[in-house]
Amino acid sequence: MVPMFVLWSLSMEHAILQNSACDIYQNYFEDIEQHELIEQFTSKTVHVYKDYLDARRSCSYITWSEEGLHFCSVHCNIGELKNTCTDSYIWDVEHPNTPLQTLVPPFQARCMEYNFKDGCQLAGGLFSGQVAIWDIRVGQEPVEMTLREASHSDVVTKVLWTGTKTSNEFLSGANDGRILWWDMRNLNEPYDFLNLAPKDTGTDVDPSKCFGVCAVEFEQTMPNKYTVGTENGIIYSCSRKYKTPADKIQAQTRAHTGPVYSVERNPLFIKNYISVGDWQTKIWTEDCRDNPIVWTKEYAVQLTCGIWSPTRCSLVFICRMDGVMDAWDVIHRLDGPVLRIKIPFTDLSYTREESQLSDVPLLSVRVHRSGKLIANGTEAGVIYLTEISDNLTFSSANDKPALSGMLEREMRRQRLLEAKIKEMKLREKELERERIRRQMRMEKENSIEDEEQDLIYSAQHQFWIKIHGRKSLKHTLKGLRMRDKGVNLLKPTNKPTIFKRAAELPIPFDFRPDTADFFTEEVRIAGEHFLEQFDLKLRHVSTNVRPDVVDAGPVRVHHQKRRHKCDNFGFARIDRGRRWRRRRRSFRRFHHGFGQQQFAFVHLGAALG
C-alpha cells in the first residue's frame, strides 16, 4: 500500500510541471476589441387602477401628492356635459382595487393639482369655468368655489399653485384664452389676469380672438415667469413684473402646427423646456426662442403629452395616440427612444375583438418624485402604474456635464444658423432694393431722354414757325411785287425755257390759307387773288429737266449743272462759292447757324418768266 504523503508529492510534482509547461500569466485575446456592456432598460406594470362606473370616461389628468403615497385621477366625459357622473378619485399606491377617497365636484372636473405645501388641499378646474378647492380632511365636497360671473367662460384646462410664502395663490387657464390669478382668501374675483391675444390687437381685446390655453408651466424658482401653450400651436413667454397686457407677453413662438399639449421645464436646467404637440417633441431654451435646439423625429401618430424625469435630467417620457409611451434619453441617443413601453389593453367595456384591433390613446402621464414609478391615464379611464429599471431612474456622475455641454453646443449651432439666415435675408433685401433703384434710375433716364427729345422737337417746330411766319411772309410779298414789275431774279440763259402750269404743281405751304393760321387776312385775300389772276409757271434753268422732281414734295431748282434742294417753306440751300458770291446782290441771304451753308429764299413767284 502506497503511503498518502507519496501520493501527495506526486500530485504536487504534476501541478508544478503543468505550471512550467504553460504561462499562467499570459494575457490571451489581446488583439480582440473590447465592447462596452449594453445596458438593458426594462420596465414592468405594477398596478392597474380602473374606473368601475358604467359610463365610460377618460382619465384626463393625474397628479401625485407631496408625500408620494397616493395620487389623484380626474375622470371626465367631454362629449356629454350634462347628466353624467362627476366623480374623481384619490388612490393609494398599494391598494389598486378600491379608491382611497372620492371627490364629487358640482360639474365635471378637467384637472386637479395638489398644494405642494399642504398635501390635504387640492384645486380643480371645472367644465363650468369655475375653480373649486377641496380639503380631503373635511369631505368629498369642495369647501370653496369661485363665482360664476368672475370665472372663465369655458372649460378650465390647467390649474397650478404658485410659489408664494403663504401658499394661498394659484393660477388657472381655460379654453377662453385667459389666465386668471387667484387668492384663496378672496375667491370672489381674480387679482390679476392675462388675455392671450395677438400683440397688435390693442387694449380692447375681443374674447373671440384669444387663443385657448392647453398647457401652462410655472417654475417655483422663477416666480415671475411662466410659459403657456395654446391650441393654435403658439408658446407664450410671459412675466408678472409688468402691469400692461402688452408688456406681460414678452415673446411668442410658433412651435407646432396643432395644439401644444405639454410644456415642461427641465428640473435641473430650468432655462430649457420641452413642448409636445402634433407629431414632434422639441427642446427649447430661453436664450434662443425662435427655433428649437433639439427635436425628435416625426412620428406616424400624434403625440398627446410629455414630461421630464425628476431624477434623471436627460430622460423624457412621451405618450402617443396608439397607446405607446417612449422614453428618450437625449444623451444616450437622439435617433430613437431608449425604451418603448406598450400599455396593455385591459378595459372590460370593450369586447375581445375590439381590444385586439384598437389602441387606446394615452391622455395623461405623471412621474413619481422618486423617478421610478410612472402613472399613465388612458382614454378608457384606466390608470397604469409602471416601474422602470434603476439605470433609467438615476443619473450618473457624467450625465449633468454631458447634458450641459450638449445643450450649450446645440444652442451655439442654432445661433450660428440664425445669424446665417439673417445675413441671407439681409442680402436678399439689399439685392431687391438695388434692383428697385436700378429700375427707377432707368425709368428716370428714359423720362429725361423723352423730355429732352420733346424739348428739341418743340424748339425745332417753333423755330420753323418763326422762320415761316416772318421771313417767308416778307419775301413772298416782295416776290409778288417784283413779279408785277417784271423783274427776274434768275439770270436768263440761252437754254430753252420749259413752263408747267401751277395746277399740276404742289401748292407751296405759303399759299395755303387753310394751314397758315398766322397769315393776316389781307395776305390771305391777296394770295387767293394771285392764284385766280395769274398762271403760275416754274422756270427750270437746266439742260436736264426731270418731271418727277417737279411732282415730288420739295421743289428742286437746277442751276448751271448743279442741283439744289428747295424745301416746302420756299428756301433754297446753295453752297458758298464763286457763282454764289457773284449773285449775292440778287438774293437776300440770311444765316441759319449751320456752318458754311447759306440759305436764300426763292419763291415760285420769283421764278416766273
Image: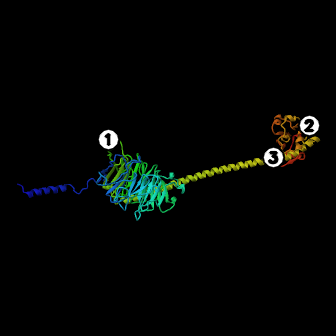
Residue wearing tag 3: 464
| Residue 608 position in % (x across, y down) | 90, 38
The nearer-to-camera label among 2 and 1 is 1
Counting residues from the N terminus, which is met first, the one under dot 2 or under dot 1?
1
Say what secondary structure mark 3 lies in.
Answer: helix
Residue wearing tag 1: 352
Counting residues from the N terminus, which is met first, the one under dot 1 or under dot 3?
1
The nearer-to-camera label among 2 and 3 is 2
Instruction: Say if residue 174 shows up in the picture.
Output: yes
| Residue 460 position in % (x across, y down) | 78, 47
Residue wearing tag 2: 533
Q: Residue type at mark 1: give it.
A: Arg
**Image height of 415 relative to 460, above or below:** below
Residues under labels 1 and 3: Cα distance? 108 Å
Say what secondary structure mark 1 lies in.
Answer: helix
Q: Are marks 2 and 1 in contact (CB under 8 Å)?
A: no
Residues under labels 2 and 3: Cα distance? 30 Å
Residues under labels 2 and 1: Cα distance? 128 Å
| Residue 609 position in % (x across, y down) | 91, 38
Say what secondary structure mark 2 lies in.
Answer: helix
